[in-house]
Amino acid sequence: MNDALKSLLDLLALERIEQDIFRGRSRASVVPRVFGGQVAAQALVAAGRTVPADRSPSSQLRSSRGDPIPHSLHAYFLRPGDPGAPIVYTVDRIRDGRSFTTRRVVAVQHGQPIFHLSASFQSYEEGLEHQEPMPPAPDPHQLPTAAEMLPRHAERFLAPDVAERLLEARAAIDLRYADEPPYVTVGAPRDPRSQVWFRTQGKLDDGGDIPRPLLDICLVTYVSDMTLLDSILLAHGRGGWAVGDVVGASLDHAMWFHRPLRADEWLLYDQESPTAQGGRGLGQGRIFTADGQLAASVIQEGVIRVPR
């Protein structure tokens, strides 16, 4: 486990300041606001720490302690977060039913809400099961790392330090593109589909303040906001904010967790965009384990604007 991953785990270990109120820190981002995946992951940690221990969508997902695992989350990004200020997370215990538990989390900075999240947790049930097959994808070990890819294309970015800032921001995650990322093929529209493999930079411990497998789901939530809008950029031959040919931000984010996953083992993030219009674009993704299990589904809408 490298220092960047240790730092990320520290960010997720929220301070409890009241029964259902938690405080989190931020770290510098490549853009002048808190990274959306961080806020979503921290809010999910806050929700999970208020849920009874028998809420898990799968007996396989449950840890030996019976820790709670969400089966879905729905979130809205309301205002840009200030990386220099703490974030206070207030949890509302909306419902504790026989099968499902619902929590609402509001993230606040400077007296204003910046983020809303609703998360649902379920007690284990057996039922019907099917899934779409995993799409073809290259072996992640044969793909270039970010440390190999980004410096190679640094001349394409707005400033000389952008590649270094991107590497620093993603140092906790080993993320590898199956095909060329948007900033490489600027000016050449492509099919609006993208694949990345990812895992944490090092193995995770089973102990700590956030028990496995809740920690795995929170880390996957963190990563899910990194590349989901790439497929929109590909459809229009745009390179992204680092190139300077679009400006954008996440608007809302939804995830469903289907089957067991481990964030420290390779996961395939298969992404596409069915539409873009009105200054907004929609991205949707499926997260598969290396052995082909569909572990999670993701949908996000974001602002995508061409600078004038």
Image: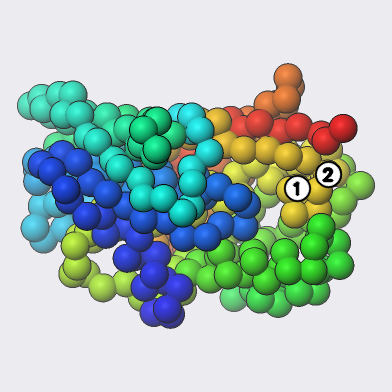
Residue most toward the right? 187
Left or right side of 17 for 38: right
Q: Position of residue 72 (x, y in %)?
A: 33, 35
Left or right side of 14 for 117: right
Q: Position of residue 75 (x, y in %)?
A: 42, 32
Residue type at numbered disc 2: Asp
Residue occupying image coordinates x 68% and y 61%: 178
Residue type at numbered disc 1: Gly
Residue occupying image coordinates x 51% and y 33%: 79
Q: Say few, some or many: other residues with alpha carbon within 10 Å of mark 1 (under 14 / 14 to 19 / 20 or more).
A: many
The Cα atoms of the two marked residues, 2 and 1, are separated by 6 Å
Q: How many circles with numbers are drawn on the protein?
A: 2
Q: Does label 2 or label 1 sit earlier along the sequence? A: 1
Viewer-proximal residue among 110 and 210? 110
For label 1, the SS is: loop
Residue most toward the front? 110
Q: Which mark is residue 18?
A: none
Left or right side of 226 for 97: left
Give the image quarter of residue 64: bottom left
Residue 190 shows up from this direction: no
Q: Say few, some or many: other residues with alpha carbon within 10 Å of mark 2 (under 14 / 14 to 19 / 20 or more).
A: some
Q: Does residue 239 sit above or below 128 in this rendering?
A: below
Viewer-proximal residue among 300 and 197? 300
Mark 2 touches mark 1? (CB < 8 Å): yes
Q: Quadrant of the N terminus?
A: bottom left
Q: Position of residue 283 (x, y in %)?
A: 61, 35
Residue most toward the bottom? 2
Residue occupying image coordinates x 39% and y 39%: 109
From the image, tell me which residue sits under label 1: 240
From the image, tell me which residue sits under label 2: 245
